[in-house]
Amino acid sequence: MRQVKRLAAETHRTLTQVMADALRSEISRHQAPARRPRVELPTDEGDGLLPGVDLDDTAGLLDLMEEHEVPARDAEPGAASRSPSIPGR
C-alpha cells in the first residue's frame, strides 16, 4: 500500500485513480486481442513488378519514374509530366 501511495503522490493522482488504472491494465493484459476482418486490397491484373523495380529502393524508383516521364497532352512542347508511363504495358 505504501508503494501505491507513493505512486499516487509522484503522479499527482488519487489512490482511487491509481488503483483503477492498475485494474484496467491487469484486465486488458488478459483479454484476447480483437480479431480484425480480413482486408482485400485491389490489385491490377498482371505478373507483378517489372524487372528492375525494387520497392525498397526509393531512390531507384524515382530514377525509374523520371526515365519514363511522358509529355502531358495539354502541356507546352518539351514539358514533361510527373505521371510516369509504365514500360511494357
Image (cartoon, rainbow, N blue to C red):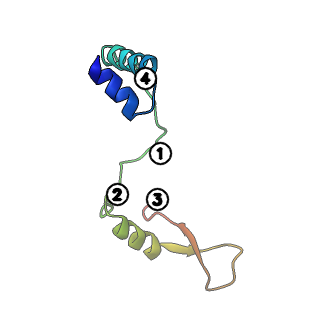
Q: Earlier in the sequence, mark 4 or mark 3?
A: 4
The Cα atoms of the two marked residues, 2 and 3, are separated by 19 Å
The residue that disc 2 covers is 55
Residue 11 found in image quarter: top left
How many angstroms separate mark 1 from mark 3 (CA)? 12 Å
Task: Name the residue at 30% across, 14% down.
Answer: 30
Amino acid type of the residue tagged 3 in the rendering: Arg
Of 34 and 29, which appears nearest the observer?
29
Secondary structure type for disc 4? loop
User: Which label's residue is closer to the chain start, 2 or 3?
Assistant: 2
- Residue type marked 4: Arg
For label 4, count other residues whose C-alpha is less than 10 Å away and answer few (under 14), some (14-19) or many (20+).
few
Q: Residue at x 28, y 20 (%)?
A: 2
Answer with the quarter of the image where residue 12 lies: top left
Q: Percent from the top left, x then y, of residue 32?
A: 33, 15
Q: Could you say which quadrant of the image residue 75 lies in?
A: bottom right
Element at label 1: loop
Position of residue 80 in the picture relative to residue 24 (left or right): right
Q: Which residue is mark 1?
A: 44
* Up/down of 60 relative to 80, above or below: above
Which marked residue is nearer to the observer: mark 4 or mark 2? 4
Question: 15 or 70, which lies in front?
Answer: 15
Q: Height in image: 53 above or below 45? A: below
* Residue position marked by numbered label 4 in the rendering: 36
Residue type (three-letter) at the residue carrying disc 1: Asp
Label 4 or label 3, whichever lies nearer to me, is 4
Labels 1, 4: front one: 4
Of mark 4 and mark 2, the one earlier in the sequence is 4
Percent x, y of residue 46: 41, 47
Residue at numbered disc 3: 89
Which mark is nearer the camera, 1 or 3? 1
